[in-house]
Amino acid sequence: MTRRWLFADQLGPHFLDTPGQPVLLVESKAVFRRRAFHRQKAHLVLSALRHRAQQGDVRLVRAETYAEAVNEPLTVCHPTSRAARGLVRRLPGVELLPPRGFVTTPDEFVSWANGRDHLRLEDFYRYARRHHDVLMDGAEPAGGRWNLDADNREPPPRGVQRLDAPAPPAIVEDEIDEQVRADLDRWEREDGITFVGNDGPRLFPATRTEALARLRHFVTYRLPVFGPHEDAMLAGDPLMAHSLLSPAINLGLLDPLEVIERAEQAYREGAAPLAGVEGFVRQILGWRDFVWHLYWYFEPEYRAVNELHARKQLPSWFAELDADAVEARCLSDVLAGVRDRGWVHHIPRLMVLGNYAMQRGWRPGAVADWFHRSFVDGYEWVMTANVVGMSQYADGGRMSSKPYAAGGAYLHRMSDYCGGCRYDPKVRVGDDACPFTAGYWSFLARNEAALTGNHRMRQPLQGLRRLSDLDALLKQEDARNFRSSAP
């Protein structure tokens, strides 16, 4: 049987044709020379590769580049980046197979997408639900509604520091993790390879056994309370009731379809409410598949689009994850979460980190690269549409109907960050001005011409024109942006 070459994000059994198929794994040091990845991301990827190498007929090659390790006939499932696909196509004797690890096939997506003026998640999600018979009661969605987001947008409970959700089972490191840590230390010391973020205990699965344990625990104990507060933030509870499964799914340790099936089974058995299950399924069958397909469906130049002409460089405090330099409590805490864990859930990513970057006019491509490198579940395909299109609105609305811009009022409602912060979310100008509130109005003023035709932005733009202190606000924000100092 031809040996199957598995990339480091293709480590589960669904990437093999039969359980005993021989495997090639390649540990390429050049990958880590090209970019400064988060230290814990590098650890997780290497740990997952080396743990997988202990299972079955596996040849693990440690080389400078992938090409050096390929010297026999191989088959490989379609990689998840254009660069990797180009490499595979250039190598003799390597057969490129269709992609695995996603629910909807490329042909199915293209058939759905072709001829549409705009590509919207909601439309794709409904198509995927019907096509794959997920959360359906015959021809109708379970419960009679497709979208239960309205039930899943509650602010955090008042007066609590943590949700009543059991913590996921801890990861127990082994001798492979010990060797990975020693090798990364040596790479930094001797090879000039650099990382961002702090080293720390491995927090996410590196084996299928660990991933399945996390999946079982989430479906049993956390999914039942996931829905209502999935968009909320608590400073003392960075995990909330989120699944923490994205790193394992993106490494290929879990098949997204098996995750979806487990969640639907919990609903059908009455073990989890429909609203939470629907919200969770939307993240995987909806968003995950959607952004994967957009990465390939949009032109290769999509990553460089910049319809709002955002040109500023990322400031050093952000690029270096220097959370201690930041006084704004929400931004400091979220940046510290990236520094210390390489992970925060989707709302801090979108409404704190991405929102702040868009307000300041940072280059979308640089922001996407930062997310790719700094998050343990970050890959080019993940972050291109998620950051360039959704978070930074750099495509002018090709995949999102409005910019995800918000001021301090949103953060005050959906988190407990504003209590104890030196800034006031109600203040736009002055020493106590919330950088998100001031930044929101500055963003609207800077992009008013580009946003005027968007009907969803009509009311915010009308509010902009009523501000009596707009000139002072813009002068204040211009000075802040010029200094590039932390808020």
Image: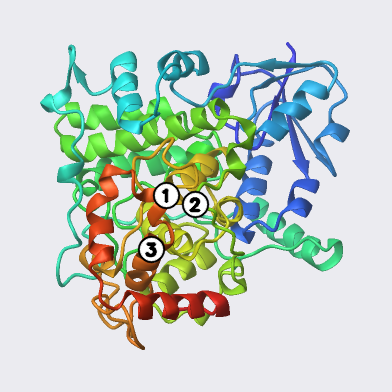
Horizontal arrangement in the rendering, residue 139 relative to residue 41 (left or right): left
Asked if one can make out residue 22 in the rendered structure from this viewpoint, the answer is yes
Give the number of the disc on residue 450. Answer: 1
Q: In x, y percent, where is residue 93?
A: 83, 15
Q: Is 464 in front, or is 39?
A: 464
* Callout 2 secondary element: loop
- Contact flag, marks 2 and 1 (Cβ < 8 Å): yes
Q: Residue at horizontal 36%, vertical 52%? A: 404
Give the number of the disc on residue 308. Answer: 2
Task: Return the disc, 2 or 3, that comes first in the chain's sequence.
Answer: 2
CA gap, disc 2 and disc 1:
7 Å
Q: Is residue 29 above or below residue 136?
A: below
CA gap, disc 3 and disc 1:
10 Å
Residue with the most extreme left position: 144
Residue type at mark 3: give it.
Ala
Q: In x, y percent, where is residue 56?
A: 67, 27
Q: In this view, does 262 lie above or below 225?
A: above
Horizontal arrangement in the rendering, residue 265 relative to residue 296 (left or right): left
Q: In x, y percent, where is residue 397?
A: 41, 40
Mark 3: few/some/many CA within 10 Å (<14, 14-19, 20+)? some
Q: In x, y percent, where is residue 135?
A: 23, 24
Q: Is 17 in front, or is 157?
A: 157
Give the number of the disc on residue 445. Answer: 3
Q: Is residue 268 above or below residue 178?
A: above
Residue type at mark 2: give it.
Leu
* Image mark count: 3
